[in-house]
Amino acid sequence: MKQILVACIALCMAFSVSALTYDLPEDGSRLLGGNQWHRVQKGETIALIAERYGVGFLAVMAANKGVDPFLPEEDTELLIPTQILLPDVERKGVVVNLAELRLYYFRPNSTEVDVLPIGIGRIGRETPEMSTYISQKREQPTWTPTQNIRNEYAAKGIILPPVVQAGPENPLGEYALRLAYGNGEYLIHGTNKEFGVGLRVSSGCIRLFPDDIEYLFSQVNLKTPVRIINQSIKHSLEPSGEFLLEVHQPLNRSEEEVTQATSLQLSRDDIKFITQSGVDSSVVNQALKNQQGIALSVGEKQG
């Protein structure tokens, strides 16, 4: 079996600023778009390339193992993972898949979905899984850091005020969507530090590129449902009979795990999929090992 490596397919995909907009597949398919290739130019970094294509930094790194993130070799061909499987969830409202570091916005009364790269909570400050909704929309938000966050900054020699006013020093950026979960402490917001998009660096909130949050802010309404999931493994039996599998590296839960191979937790549904007739176990095992976040063909339905 070979990987699905389709260069520059535009039939199902159109670019906005950083987000990607796809036509929703029909007939039971879960496959979106096509992969692309990028030839590294002098002076480019992975972060700049990732932003240009509307994907996350770690997504590009996972798809291109061993590439230097800061000084990728000139003329290196990079696989840009813009062909993806939809997560196994209702196609409604905002869906965040933490394992992918992607946000899906299913446009109401539309056959399109926007896919945006995101930053999420770091180890020890994880973004929780949840089913909730948008409870508040704030333009030019202020930031009220918790005492724990103020203590963290103080340890670095930075004294935060009780309230950080809107402006270039505000880490929430220019737009914020508050989630109803818990005490309302979790936000989907912009950022004044764009390198954090596509990484696990926040205190639990979800970060978007400034243009992406501006777009999302303009589209969603109060009470828009939000589902935050953690699906490292996605799979699909396509209408053509092809079996597709997409495996992402699971989120580390401790600093110790960062230096170790992160084990995948296979669900009963995952096991049922990869053990059925027609699935090539050798390709599956390689995908589970490599965890590249790429939709791979792993076989064809028999009969």
Image (cartoon, helix red, strand yellow):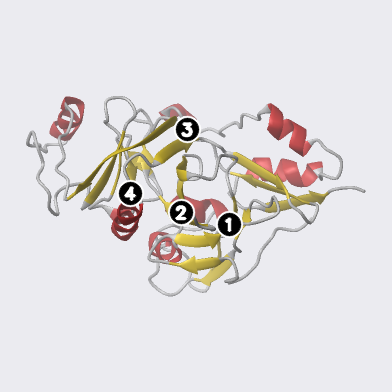
Q: Given the image, on which type of amino acid does mark 2 rest?
A: Arg
Q: Given the image, on which type of amino acid does mark 3 rest?
A: Asn
Q: Which of marks 4 and 2 is nearer the N terminus?
A: 2
Q: Disc number at residue 107?
A: 2
Foreground tag (3 vs 2): 2
The residue that mark 3 highlights is 252
Q: Crowding near pointer 2: few (<14 within 10 Å), some, many (20+)?
A: some
Q: Which of 125 and 133 is in front in this view?
A: 133
The residue that mark 4 highlights is 196
Foreground tag (3 vs 1): 1
**Marks 4,1: beta carbons within 8 A:** no
Q: Nearer the viewer, residue 178 or 6?
A: 178
The quadrant where residue 234 appears: top right
Q: Crowding near pointer 1: few (<14 within 10 Å), some, many (20+)?
A: many
**Marks 4,2: beta carbons within 8 A:** no
Q: Nearer the viewer, residue 34 or 81?
A: 34
Can residue 285 be seen at all in this image of the molecule?
yes
Q: Nearer the viewer, residue 87 or 169?
A: 87
Question: Going 58% across and 57% down the picture, which residue do you hit?
Answer: 24
Q: Earlier in the sequence, mark 2 or mark 1?
A: 1
Spot occupied by residue 119 in the image (x, y as percentages of width and height): 37, 45
**Marks 3,1: beta carbons within 8 A:** no
Spot occupied by residue 90 in the image (x, y as percentages of width and height): 55, 40
**Marks 2,1: beta carbons within 8 A:** no
Q: Distance between the residues labelled 3 and 2?
A: 31 Å
Name the secondary structure under disc 2: loop
- Viewed as shown, does residue 275 lie left or right of 161? right
